[in-house]
Image: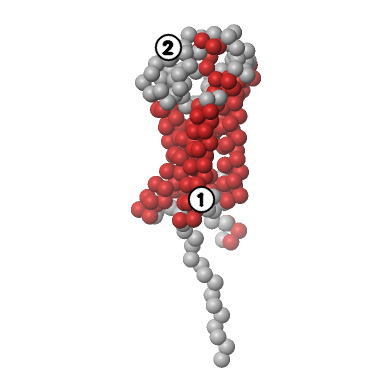
Amino acid sequence: MQPSPVAPSTAPITPHAPSHRHTLLLWTLGALACVVAWDAAGQDLAFAQVFGSSNGFPMRDQWFFVQVLHEGARRLGWLLVLLLALSVWWPRGFLRKLDASERLQMAVSALLSLAVVSITKNLSATSCPWDLAQFGGVARHVSHWALGVLDGGSGRCFPAGHASAGFAFLGGYFALRHKVPSAARWWLAGALLAGFVLGAAQQVRGAHFMSHTLWTGWLCWVTGWLCDLAATALRPRFPHFASTTTPPDSSHA
Protein backbone atom coordinates (compact mmCIF):
# COMPACT_ATOMS: atom_id res chain seq x y z
CA MET A 1 0.00 0.00 0.00
CA GLN A 2 1.51 3.28 -1.11
CA PRO A 3 1.39 6.30 1.23
CA SER A 4 -1.00 9.06 0.26
CA PRO A 5 0.69 12.09 -1.28
CA VAL A 6 1.02 15.04 1.02
CA ALA A 7 -1.10 17.97 -0.11
CA PRO A 8 0.76 21.24 -0.43
CA SER A 9 0.10 23.77 2.29
CA THR A 10 -2.47 26.40 1.39
CA ALA A 11 -2.16 28.42 4.58
CA PRO A 12 -2.00 32.11 3.75
CA ILE A 13 1.14 34.03 4.51
CA THR A 14 0.51 36.48 7.31
CA PRO A 15 0.98 39.92 5.79
CA HIS A 16 2.27 41.39 9.01
CA ALA A 17 4.55 38.59 10.19
CA PRO A 18 7.20 39.66 12.71
CA SER A 19 9.95 39.50 10.08
CA HIS A 20 8.05 41.92 7.83
CA ARG A 21 7.40 44.31 10.69
CA HIS A 22 11.02 44.20 11.80
CA THR A 23 12.24 44.93 8.28
CA LEU A 24 9.89 47.90 7.96
CA LEU A 25 10.90 49.15 11.37
CA LEU A 26 14.59 48.99 10.45
CA TRP A 27 13.98 50.89 7.21
CA THR A 28 11.89 53.48 9.04
CA LEU A 29 14.46 54.01 11.79
CA GLY A 30 17.27 54.08 9.24
CA ALA A 31 15.49 56.79 7.26
CA LEU A 32 14.86 58.72 10.47
CA ALA A 33 18.55 58.52 11.34
CA CYS A 34 19.46 59.93 7.91
CA VAL A 35 17.03 62.83 8.25
CA VAL A 36 18.22 63.64 11.77
CA ALA A 37 21.85 63.42 10.58
CA TRP A 38 21.13 66.00 7.87
CA ASP A 39 19.54 68.27 10.48
CA ALA A 40 22.48 67.81 12.85
CA ALA A 41 24.97 68.64 10.09
CA GLY A 42 23.30 72.04 9.64
CA GLN A 43 23.66 72.07 5.86
CA ASP A 44 20.27 73.59 5.01
CA LEU A 45 21.50 77.15 4.69
CA ALA A 46 24.68 76.22 2.81
CA PHE A 47 22.70 74.14 0.32
CA ALA A 48 20.17 76.96 -0.20
CA GLN A 49 23.01 79.35 -0.99
CA VAL A 50 23.80 77.22 -4.05
CA PHE A 51 20.57 78.50 -5.62
CA GLY A 52 20.12 81.91 -4.01
CA SER A 53 22.00 85.01 -2.92
CA SER A 54 21.30 88.33 -1.19
CA ASN A 55 19.37 89.25 -4.33
CA GLY A 56 16.98 86.35 -3.87
CA PHE A 57 16.42 83.20 -5.89
CA PRO A 58 16.67 83.69 -9.67
CA MET A 59 14.43 80.69 -10.40
CA ARG A 60 11.64 81.72 -8.02
CA ASP A 61 9.30 82.88 -10.79
CA GLN A 62 10.67 80.78 -13.65
CA TRP A 63 7.74 79.54 -15.75
CA PHE A 64 8.56 75.82 -15.81
CA PHE A 65 9.15 75.63 -12.06
CA VAL A 66 5.99 77.60 -11.25
CA GLN A 67 3.47 76.45 -13.83
CA VAL A 68 4.59 72.84 -14.42
CA LEU A 69 6.45 71.60 -11.34
CA HIS A 70 4.30 73.54 -8.89
CA GLU A 71 0.81 74.28 -10.19
CA GLY A 72 0.67 71.41 -12.68
CA ALA A 73 2.07 68.84 -10.24
CA ARG A 74 -0.30 70.00 -7.50
CA ARG A 75 -3.33 69.51 -9.75
CA LEU A 76 -2.02 66.15 -10.93
CA GLY A 77 -1.61 65.00 -7.33
CA TRP A 78 -5.22 65.85 -6.48
CA LEU A 79 -6.38 64.14 -9.67
CA LEU A 80 -4.59 60.95 -8.61
CA VAL A 81 -6.23 61.14 -5.16
CA LEU A 82 -9.61 61.43 -6.88
CA LEU A 83 -8.86 58.46 -9.13
CA LEU A 84 -7.82 56.37 -6.12
CA ALA A 85 -11.08 57.26 -4.39
CA LEU A 86 -13.09 56.26 -7.46
CA SER A 87 -11.12 53.02 -7.77
CA VAL A 88 -12.67 51.79 -4.53
CA TRP A 89 -15.81 51.09 -6.58
CA TRP A 90 -14.47 51.11 -10.15
CA PRO A 91 -10.93 49.68 -10.15
CA ARG A 92 -8.76 49.57 -13.25
CA GLY A 93 -5.53 47.77 -14.10
CA PHE A 94 -3.57 46.19 -11.27
CA LEU A 95 -5.94 47.75 -8.73
CA ARG A 96 -8.46 45.06 -9.73
CA LYS A 97 -6.27 42.54 -7.92
CA LEU A 98 -6.89 44.31 -4.60
CA ASP A 99 -10.04 44.05 -2.56
CA ALA A 100 -12.15 47.13 -1.90
CA SER A 101 -10.71 47.70 1.57
CA GLU A 102 -7.17 47.74 0.20
CA ARG A 103 -8.11 50.24 -2.48
CA LEU A 104 -9.78 52.38 0.18
CA GLN A 105 -6.58 52.14 2.20
CA MET A 106 -4.60 53.62 -0.70
CA ALA A 107 -6.92 56.62 -0.97
CA VAL A 108 -7.21 57.21 2.78
CA SER A 109 -3.47 56.94 3.40
CA ALA A 110 -2.81 59.57 0.71
CA LEU A 111 -5.37 61.96 2.20
CA LEU A 112 -4.10 61.44 5.75
CA SER A 113 -0.51 62.03 4.65
CA LEU A 114 -1.52 65.31 3.02
CA ALA A 115 -3.40 66.27 6.18
CA VAL A 116 -0.50 65.45 8.51
CA VAL A 117 1.93 67.55 6.49
CA SER A 118 -0.54 70.43 6.11
CA ILE A 119 -1.42 70.56 9.82
CA THR A 120 2.23 70.37 10.88
CA LYS A 121 3.13 73.11 8.41
CA ASN A 122 0.39 75.43 9.65
CA LEU A 123 1.59 75.01 13.23
CA SER A 124 5.22 75.77 12.34
CA ALA A 125 6.92 79.12 13.03
CA THR A 126 9.68 78.36 10.51
CA SER A 127 9.86 80.71 7.53
CA CYS A 128 10.86 79.83 3.97
CA PRO A 129 14.37 80.47 2.61
CA TRP A 130 13.19 83.33 0.40
CA ASP A 131 11.96 85.12 3.56
CA LEU A 132 15.42 85.13 5.16
CA ALA A 133 17.69 88.18 5.28
CA GLN A 134 20.47 86.17 3.61
CA PHE A 135 18.27 85.99 0.51
CA GLY A 136 16.81 89.47 0.49
CA GLY A 137 14.04 88.95 3.05
CA VAL A 138 13.62 90.12 6.63
CA ALA A 139 13.60 86.92 8.71
CA ARG A 140 16.55 85.32 10.46
CA HIS A 141 17.48 81.68 10.16
CA VAL A 142 16.17 79.68 13.12
CA SER A 143 16.15 75.89 13.33
CA HIS A 144 12.74 74.28 13.07
CA TRP A 145 13.64 72.52 16.32
CA ALA A 146 13.69 75.87 18.15
CA LEU A 147 10.04 75.46 19.09
CA GLY A 148 8.26 78.70 19.95
CA VAL A 149 11.12 80.88 18.68
CA LEU A 150 9.92 83.32 16.03
CA ASP A 151 12.27 84.20 13.19
CA GLY A 152 10.59 87.44 12.14
CA GLY A 153 9.05 85.99 9.01
CA SER A 154 5.65 84.64 8.04
CA GLY A 155 6.39 81.08 9.23
CA ARG A 156 4.29 78.08 8.19
CA CYS A 157 7.00 76.64 5.95
CA PHE A 158 8.02 73.38 7.66
CA PRO A 159 7.73 70.65 6.46
CA ALA A 160 7.48 70.88 2.66
CA GLY A 161 3.85 70.89 1.61
CA HIS A 162 4.46 70.66 -2.11
CA ALA A 163 6.68 67.57 -1.87
CA SER A 164 3.75 65.80 -0.22
CA ALA A 165 2.05 65.81 -3.64
CA GLY A 166 4.43 62.94 -4.39
CA PHE A 167 5.30 61.49 -1.00
CA ALA A 168 1.64 61.24 0.07
CA PHE A 169 1.28 58.18 -2.19
CA LEU A 170 3.95 56.18 -0.35
CA GLY A 171 1.16 54.53 1.61
CA GLY A 172 0.02 52.80 -1.56
CA TYR A 173 3.09 50.59 -1.34
CA PHE A 174 1.78 48.95 1.84
CA ALA A 175 -1.61 48.16 0.29
CA LEU A 176 -0.06 46.74 -2.89
CA ARG A 177 2.94 44.79 -1.64
CA HIS A 178 1.20 41.53 -0.68
CA LYS A 179 -0.88 40.86 -3.80
CA VAL A 180 1.00 42.77 -6.51
CA PRO A 181 4.58 43.15 -5.24
CA SER A 182 5.95 44.19 -8.61
CA ALA A 183 3.45 47.05 -8.89
CA ALA A 184 4.17 47.93 -5.25
CA ARG A 185 7.87 48.43 -5.98
CA TRP A 186 7.14 50.61 -9.00
CA TRP A 187 4.58 52.56 -7.00
CA LEU A 188 7.10 53.12 -4.21
CA ALA A 189 9.79 54.24 -6.64
CA GLY A 190 7.36 56.59 -8.39
CA ALA A 191 6.19 58.20 -5.15
CA LEU A 192 9.77 58.68 -3.93
CA LEU A 193 10.89 60.10 -7.27
CA ALA A 194 7.93 62.48 -7.48
CA GLY A 195 8.43 63.67 -3.90
CA PHE A 196 12.13 64.37 -4.34
CA VAL A 197 11.68 66.05 -7.74
CA LEU A 198 8.97 68.35 -6.39
CA GLY A 199 10.99 69.02 -3.25
CA ALA A 200 14.09 69.83 -5.30
CA ALA A 201 12.08 72.19 -7.50
CA GLN A 202 10.95 74.11 -4.44
CA GLN A 203 14.51 74.12 -3.11
CA VAL A 204 15.72 75.76 -6.33
CA ARG A 205 12.95 78.38 -6.10
CA GLY A 206 13.81 79.17 -2.47
CA ALA A 207 10.50 77.90 -1.12
CA HIS A 208 11.95 75.18 1.14
CA PHE A 209 15.12 73.81 2.68
CA MET A 210 16.24 70.26 2.01
CA SER A 211 15.34 69.21 5.56
CA HIS A 212 11.75 70.26 4.87
CA THR A 213 11.55 67.78 1.99
CA LEU A 214 13.24 64.98 3.93
CA TRP A 215 10.88 65.33 6.90
CA THR A 216 7.87 65.37 4.59
CA GLY A 217 8.99 62.10 3.04
CA TRP A 218 9.49 60.47 6.43
CA LEU A 219 6.17 61.70 7.82
CA CYS A 220 4.30 60.40 4.77
CA TRP A 221 6.03 57.02 5.01
CA VAL A 222 5.13 56.64 8.69
CA THR A 223 1.56 57.77 8.05
CA GLY A 224 1.22 55.18 5.29
CA TRP A 225 2.59 52.44 7.54
CA LEU A 226 0.27 53.37 10.41
CA CYS A 227 -2.67 53.31 7.99
CA ASP A 228 -1.62 49.82 6.94
CA LEU A 229 -1.50 48.63 10.55
CA ALA A 230 -4.90 50.18 11.26
CA ALA A 231 -6.43 48.69 8.10
CA THR A 232 -5.12 45.24 9.01
CA ALA A 233 -6.67 45.51 12.47
CA LEU A 234 -10.02 46.81 11.18
CA ARG A 235 -10.42 44.56 8.13
CA PRO A 236 -11.72 41.49 10.05
CA ARG A 237 -14.51 43.64 11.52
CA PHE A 238 -15.81 44.49 8.05
CA PRO A 239 -15.50 41.24 6.09
CA HIS A 240 -18.20 42.31 3.61
CA PHE A 241 -15.96 45.19 2.51
CA ALA A 242 -12.86 43.03 2.05
CA SER A 243 -13.99 41.69 -1.29
CA THR A 244 -13.15 42.56 -4.85
CA THR A 245 -15.50 44.47 -7.12
CA THR A 246 -14.01 42.87 -10.22
CA PRO A 247 -16.80 41.47 -12.38
CA PRO A 248 -16.62 37.77 -13.25
CA ASP A 249 -15.10 36.68 -16.54
CA SER A 250 -18.00 36.53 -19.02
CA SER A 251 -16.09 34.09 -21.25
CA HIS A 252 -17.06 31.28 -18.86
CA ALA A 253 -20.76 32.12 -18.83
- The answer to whether one can see residue 169 in this image is no
Front residue of 15 and 21: 21
- The answer to whether one can see residue 27 in this image is yes
Instruction: Name the spot of residue 174 as percent of width and height, x first.
Output: 50, 46
Instruction: Name the residue at the front extreme.
Output: 41
Q: What residue is at 37 percent from the left and 50 percent from the top?
A: 234
Give the structural element (helix, strand or loop) at label 1: helix
Instruction: Name the spot of residue 52 as percent of width and height, x first.
Output: 60, 15
As drawn, the label of residue 152 is: 2
Give the structural element (helix, strand or loop) at label 2: loop
Front residue of 248 and 48: 48
Mark 2 surroundings: few (<14), some (14-19) or many (≥20) residues within 10 A: some
Instruction: Name the spot of residue 56 as percent of width and height, x first.
Output: 58, 11
Instruction: Find residue 253 and report its image quarter.
Output: bottom right
Q: Is residue 71 left or right of residue 108?
A: right
- Kindly identify which residue carries mark 1: 23
Front residue of 26 and 179: 26
In the rendered view, tell whether residue 182 sits above or below residue 63.
below
Q: Is residue 62 left or right of residue 32?
A: right
Q: What residue is at 56 percent from the left and 80 percent from the top?
A: 5
In the rendered view, tell whether residue 6 sits above or below residue 29.
below
Which residue type does callout 2 highlight?
A: Gly
Labels 1 & 2 near each other (Cβ < 8 A): no
Q: What residue is at 53 percent from the left and 36 percent from the top?
A: 34
In the rendered view, tell whether residue 117 sits above or below residue 27.
above
Task: Kindly report the distance in space between the C-alpha atoms of the residues bearing marks 1 and 2.
Answer: 43 Å
Instruction: Name the spot of residue 119 as percent of width and height, x first.
Output: 40, 27
In the rendered view, tell whether residue 40 sits above or below residue 234.
above
Q: Is residue 67 left or right of residue 175?
A: right
- Quarter in which the N terminus is drawn: bottom right
